[in-house]
Image (cartoon, rainbow, N blue to C red):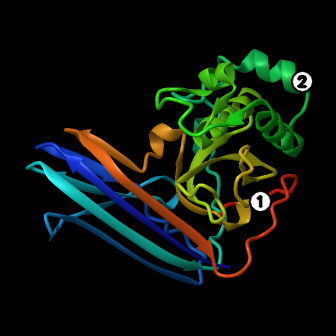
């Protein structure tokens, strides 16, 4: 499978701003072809970038702006084949079963046991996915950046990160390691960066997308972490910025795969 993705961002910074981008496709082994380009300019000049390794093959591109600037980011990648599924070190299985900022599994423990009883393993993945899909409404702009899984459950609505956070929290409540993955998602409408959950069962990580908005087999990993606090596509580590434009494209060369929610799928 060949997938082509692109991202364009325009943002303005104040003086002495330090920013981090996480928009590049994860450089995991296994792809038969991997071509990409990344350009960041301010005032027509190239901005120096420092590439830093992130979780699970992801990469952060760090930049600094001494003066206020209007910054343009252009990224594109064409990838053929599929990444080799990564191993799951014991440290990850411990880390991803703990509560986190936006996936408050400790607070949702009673809910998880009341709704899912003795269900475990692969059956639990499918049951949680279908439950979240049925309980929440996808409404653009309906949630705040500070909302976690508990707030999402109370409001019964959200966007992709909210659906993923709730699924992650419920799975962790039942001792299933679960994490959030930021992805490019061909077939997604409206097109944007997308967030899905990954859960570890049967010795491997499998994608759960409770929104059902795109076929999982076509998705490309950007990065992954405990929740969206680890996977933001643009963040500041000093100063501030205002995002003015965001355009995402993601396509497959050929027909999109058919989505079967009952099938186990690994992100590749």
Q: Earlier in the sequence, mark 2 or mark 1?
A: 2
Whole-percent x, y for residue 171 in the image: 74, 34
Above or below: residue 36 compared with residue 100:
below
Indicate the position of residue 80 as horizontal and vertical percent values.
Answer: 60, 81
Residue at x-position 82% and y-position 51%: 202
What x and y, as percent, mark residue 251? 60, 72
From the viewer's perspective, is 5 left or right of 159?
A: left
Q: Residue 117, which numbered label?
A: 2
- Residue 93 visible in the current orientation: no
Residue at 19% x, 46% y: name it.
13
Q: Which mark is residue 265?
A: 1
Q: Residue at x 15, y 42 (%)?
A: 14
Total count of labels: 2
Residue 151 placement: quadrant: top right
Residue 209 horizontal/vertical position (percent): 71, 48
User: Which of 240/89 is in front?
Assistant: 240
| Residue 107, above or below 49 | above
Which type of secondary structure does the marked residue at label 2 adopt? loop
């Amino acid at each position: 499978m060949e997938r082509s993705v692109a991202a364009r961002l325009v943002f303005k910074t104040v003086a002495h701003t330090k920013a981090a981008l996480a928009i590049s496709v994860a450089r995991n082994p296994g792809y038969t072809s991997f071509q990409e380009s990344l350009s960041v300019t301010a005032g027509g000049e190239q901005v120096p970038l420092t590439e830093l390794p992130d979780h699970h093959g992801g990469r952060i591109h760090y930049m600094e702006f001494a003066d206020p600037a209007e910054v343009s980011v252009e990224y594109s990648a064409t990838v053929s084949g599929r990444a080799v599924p990564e191993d799951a070190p014991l440290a990850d299985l411990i880390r991803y079963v703990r509560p986190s900022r936006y996936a408050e599994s400790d607070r949702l423990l009673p809910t998880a046991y009341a709704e899912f009883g003795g269900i475990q393993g692969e059956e639990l993945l499918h049951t949680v996915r279908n439950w979240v899909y049925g309980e929440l409404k996808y409404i653009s702009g309906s949630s705040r950046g500070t909302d976690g899984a508990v707030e999402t459950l109370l409001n019964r609505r959200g966007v992709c990160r909210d659906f993923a956070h709730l699924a992650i929290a419920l799975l962790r409540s039942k001792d299933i390691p679960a994490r959030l993955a930021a992805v490019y998602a061909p077939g997604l409408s409206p097109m944007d960066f997308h967030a899905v959950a990954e859960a570890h069962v049967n010795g491997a990580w499998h994608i759960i997308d409770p929104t059902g908005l795109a076929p999982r087999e076509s998705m490309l990993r950007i990065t992954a972490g405990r929740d969206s606090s680890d996977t933001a596509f643009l963040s500041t580590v000093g100063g501030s910025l205002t995002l003015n434009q965001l355009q995402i494209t993601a396509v497959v060369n050929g027909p999109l795969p058919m989505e079967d929610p009952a099938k186990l799928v690994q992100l590749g």
